[in-house]
Amino acid sequence: MTRDDAWSLLTEFTKGDSLRKHARAVETSMRAYADRFGEDPERWGIAGMLHDFDYEMHPHAPHHPVKGAEILTARGVEPGVVYAILAHADYSGMPRVSRLDKALYACDELTGFVHACALVRPGKVISGLEPASVKKKLKDKGFARTVNRDDVYRGAAELGVDLDAHIAFVVQALEGVAPEIGLARA
C-alpha cells in the first residue's frame, strides 16, 4: 500500500476534519521516528495515518480497532502494520512487540495532546512549545481530558525514550506540517 492508497482509505472512512488532522499528525510523528530508528518511513507513516481510520464507525472498545483491522486486512495492508494498529489499543490484547508497535502507541496520545497544547497558545503556534509546558498541561486533568495520561507516560517508557525528549521530538516533527493540521509556525 502506498501513502496515496492509505490516504484514500482514510478519507473513505473518516469524514471529520479533526480526525484527519490527527491521522496526518501521527503519520508525521511516525515518519520522523522511522527516520530516527533507521526504519521504513512509508510503512511507519501508513501505520500512523490509518491507526484510527475506523474510529468514526466504531468509536468504542472493543470494536475499534478490531473491526478496522478486518477492513485493513481485506484491503491488503501489510500484516505488521495491521498488528501495530491493533496493539495501539491496550484492550485489544495484542502486546506491543516490535519497535513499530511501540512507536505507534507512544505517538498516538502524545501527538493529540501536543496538538491540543499548541491550539491554546497565542496564534496556535507549535514552534517553541516546550516539554515543560506540555508536562504542566498533563498534570491538569481538565485540559484535553480525553487524553489518557498513563498512555502518554507508558508510551515513552515502552519506546525507551525520555518523556521530555519524546515531547520535543514530536513537537519538532509537527512543526513541519503545522499549517496542514491547523497550527501555525512561529
Image (spheres, helix red, strand yellow):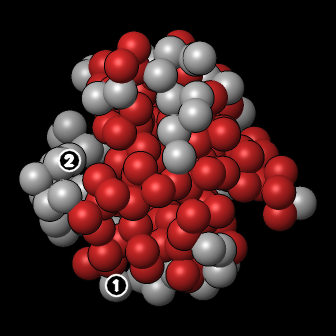
Q: Nearer the viewer, residue 70 or 162?
A: 162
Marks counted in the figure total 2
Q: Nearer the viewer, residue 163 or 15?
A: 163
Q: Residue at x 51, y 65 (%)?
A: 106
Q: Residue at x 48, y 66 (%)?
A: 105
Q: Residue at x 47, y 22 (%)?
A: 125
Q: Quadrant of residue 20?
A: top left
Mark 2 element type: loop
Q: Which residue position holds label 1?
A: 93
The percent coordinates of residue 84 (x first, y second) are 53, 66
**Is residue 176 depicted above or below 46 in this figure?**
above
Q: Residues within 10 Å of mark 2 (few under 14, many from 20)?
A: some
Q: Which residue position holds label 2?
A: 144
Q: Residues within 10 Å of mark 1 (few under 14, many from 20)?
A: few
**Cα distance in 3D space between marks 1 and 2:** 26 Å
Type of the residue with mark 2? Ala
**Is residue 162 depicted above or below 41 in this figure?**
below
The percent coordinates of residue 73 (x first, y second) are 50, 55
* The C terminus lies in quadrant: top right
Q: Quadrant of residue 4?
A: top right
Q: Can residue 48 be spotted in the picture?
A: no
Mark 1 element type: loop
**Is residue 134 depicted above or below 88 in this figure?**
above
Instruction: Tell me if 117 is positioned left or right of 25 in this view.
Output: left
The percent coordinates of residue 92 (x first, y second) are 31, 76
Type of the residue with mark 1? Gly
Please identify the residue farthest to the right as the structure is shown.
38
**Is residue 118 depicted above or below 113 in this figure?**
above
Q: Nearer the viewer, residue 176 or 85?
A: 176
Q: Residue at x 18, y 40 (%)?
A: 57
